[in-house]
Amino acid sequence: MCQGACTTSSTANANANAAKTHDFDATNDAPIDLGQALPTPRSTPDVIAPPEPHRPCRRGTLRTFRHLNPQPLANVVRCVILRVTSAYTTAINGFGLYRVFPGGMPAHDPNPAILFQAFSSDSVQQATPFKDCDLYPYPNKSAALYANHFHNYGDLNSRSARAAQLQLFARPDFNAQELPTGAEMDKIDRILAGDVLGFGDGWTSRPAVVQVPRVGEPSAAVTIPGLLTRSLTKTFVHHLQTDSIVNSYHWEPQHLRHRSPSGRVQNVYSEVWHARRFRRLHIEVQRQHSHKFKDGIPCHVLALMPGSDATQLAQFGTASSWPGYMSYSNCSKYVRAMRGSSAVQHVASFPKV
Amino acid sequence: MQLPDNFDDNLAALGITPSSSAKTNLLTHIRRELTHAAWAELLDDEFIEAYTNGVVVLCVDGVRRRIFPRFFTYTADYPEKYDLSRSS
């Protein structure tokens, strides 16, 4: 209350009636106890030291910073950004559930994109079959099939390798005339080893260096080979560009609420986009970034959910690996949990110690 | 992926020949350092740039979005949590 009154008192007023820089009268008259917390206003002009010429100042301004603002406030154009959003509420469905979009009507509601059948196990997507365009860097299908055989049975001289080779030669789509020369195959191997986004899927391998402490000596560096990683950014960019489940991704936060027959309303938390953290990060990204870029591209949060677990690879023996996975919780948990939905990306393979 | 067989030899060359109980602690230490080294590798400059300034992606639904990756959860079982968070 006092702040408001003081702010509105103009500089002209301060100059003309220099003694009365503070407009405290209203505060004092008011029955509210605020006056106790504030310094007692001076009752007579005589007690006051000569005021500075421009003193738009109020109680709220710290004395230290007054010199930084010598201009009267009248010259300042005030700029107030009002962010007005009205929440958009959907109709209540048969279960008493409804959704509230705090940022207004969403630009994109992915729910109609998901049919009920999508959640049944019948709809498990099969792995995409080989297409000619997927064969890079192999020049043709025969070369890819031959390399597949080489990588699986290359150093084996067994009956199963022979059977697989006979099977390969008998395939109608295999033509030995099309096979590249050995030098060309070497070149293809080099492309595969250095590939970033294509067939090699961008895996890089470099040893991890770990410091081991020693008593009375500086720590020793121990090199552990076998750490395989993939660029997180390239992985999710490629996923968003190509995988069809991105159609069903949720990009805007929402509340899911339940209204009981007695009229009691409570929040329902089912997915990440119902969570407070998603809402907070969404708002944070809008505030910090949406005004920074003038291209009008909407800014959205991609919710990363990495996970890792050491996995036994065989029922007998100790063969095991320790993969690191990345999934995105803009995707519904029902879709993510489905086998073959290609919702989880393999981004790391940790060496086991 | 297993460590090379000469891992113990490597340690011995460094003058580290721990007793069996100390070796458990040493392995725990190495696992934790290894996990952190792996994440230092994963959170590369490219990712930090995407995290700070976003990355524009033409998504498969035809909408161009500026994507800001943010972490929500890390799913791991108890031994891994132990590796990740143990500080001594």
Image: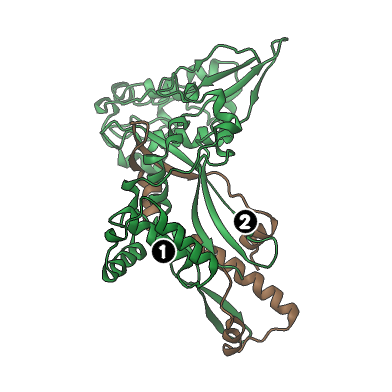
Of residues A317 and B12, the one nearer the viewer is A317
Image position of A122 (left or right of A6): right
Q: Establish if A188 lies above or below B16.
A: above
What kind of residue is marked 1? Answer: Thr
What kind of residue is marked 2? Answer: Asp
Of residues A62 and A340, the one nearer the viewer is A340
Question: Do marks 1 and 2 share a chain?
Answer: yes
Of residues B34 and A203, the one nearer the viewer is A203
Helix, strand or loop at label 1? It is: strand
Q: Would you say residue B1 is visible in this rendering? A: yes
| Residue wearing tag 2 | A309
Of residues A174 and A203, the one nearer the viewer is A174
Query: Whole-percent x and y of residue A105?
Result: 44, 18
Query: Badges 1 and 2: C-beta atoms under 8 Å apart?
Result: no
Query: Whole-percent x and y of residue A310?
Result: 63, 59
Helix, strand or loop at label 2? It is: loop
- Which residue is at a point 31% across and 70% down the rendered structure image? A186
Image position of A314 (left or right of A341): right
Image position of A333 (left or right of A167): right
Instruction: Say which chain is brown.
Output: B
Q: Earlier in the sequence, mark 1 or mark 2?
A: 1
Q: Chain of mark 2?
A: A
Label placed on residue A204? 1
Instruction: Say which chain is green.
Output: A
Residue density around tag 1, few if under 14, some if 14–19, many if 20 or more, within 10 Å: some
Query: Whole-percent x and y of residue B87?
Result: 64, 65
Q: Quadrant of residue A91?
A: top right
Image position of A250 (left or right of B76): left
Q: Establish if A177 lies above or below A53.
A: below
Q: Would you say residue A271 is visible in this rendering? A: no
Q: Chain of mark 1?
A: A
